[in-house]
Image (cartoon, rainbow, N blue to C red):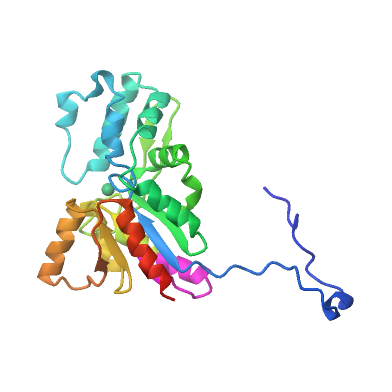
Amino acid sequence: MMAEGVGEPPLHRSPNMAASSVPSTAPVPSPPKRFLVLFDFDETIVNESSDDAVVRAAPGQQLPDWLRHSYREGYYNEQMQRILAYMAEQGVTEDSIRSKVEQIPPTPGLLTLFQYLQSRKQDFELVVVSDANMYFIEAWLERAGARHLFHRIFTNPASFDAQGRLVLLPFHAHDCQRCPDNMCKQVIVRGYLARRQQERGGCPFQRVFYVGDGANDICPMLALGPRDTAFPRRHFPMHRLLQEMQDAGTEGLKVSVVPWASGQDVVDCLNRLEEER
Ligand SMILES: [Mg+2]
Ligand SMILES: [Zn+2]
């Protein structure tokens, strides 16, 4: 831990200093960032499901039929646990799992979007909200040199145990009927927005952006307002489901919708909105 006070200017200036015309060198606290960008991970940041990519580390690069057929609807997290247990039994190492994750390509234009956000980091706070897991997401972002861009990562905890098995835990418990037991992204987004507003002295974000692709990116749309923007990946489930909700006039869906095919599409939209003060 950093020693307290190191590198900080003295708190009190002498009366002489205060009376002189020398400009103050005390750091001016930077204003809170205006915008929050929430990112899904699988098929939004990376161009594939990370779980599918990791399965290619299994012997023969695929899973046996009995394991593939053990999936029950709504219990995806449990299925992934069985897959990771099987891989550990087959002697698949942490190194080979990590390298499969690192090799997943980014979605088209995603790195352009990251560069844009990095160049405007005074305005944009970035967060990941994903039903993948912490090990995969941190491995990929570190490899891409992008881990530092993110203020927070909300995802299922994951770590290797003494037997070399990657063990997943549920992110939280919630009572949303729409979402799988281990994660409701709406609960996460509402909680984060409330907490950040409090931490920022009551100042909410001017706008919130959500970049996603999947069916589990729908629930958090109900936490967003008319100034906020949803970026559903074009022709992916989130896009189709949002269109259906808009057509049906779903109550509580207030967010603007801007489909994207490339990260550049998101940059173009952010660029327009950022210029408004
Ligand atoms: Mg996804
Ligand atoms: Zn939910």
Nearer to the camera, 71 or 58: 58
Magenta residues?
193-208
Q: Where residue 249 sits: x, y (%)?
A: 13, 72
Query: Residue 242 appears in which quarter of the rendering?
Result: bottom left
Q: Is residue 119 magenta?
A: no
Nearer to the camera, 61 or 105: 105
Residue 71 visible: yes
Seen at 34% across and 46% down, the residue is 45
Seen at 75% across and 56% down, the residue is 7
Residue 250 drawn above or below residue 98:
below
In the visual, does 244 lie left or right of 15? left
Q: Where residue 26 sits: x, y (%)?
A: 73, 68
Residue 81 drawn above or below residue 11:
above
Seen at 32% across and 42% down, the residue is 46
Seen at 36% across and 33% down, the residue is 101
Nearer to the camera, 257 or 163: 257
Q: Is residue 199 magenta?
A: yes
Q: Where residue 183 sits: x, y (%)?
A: 30, 52
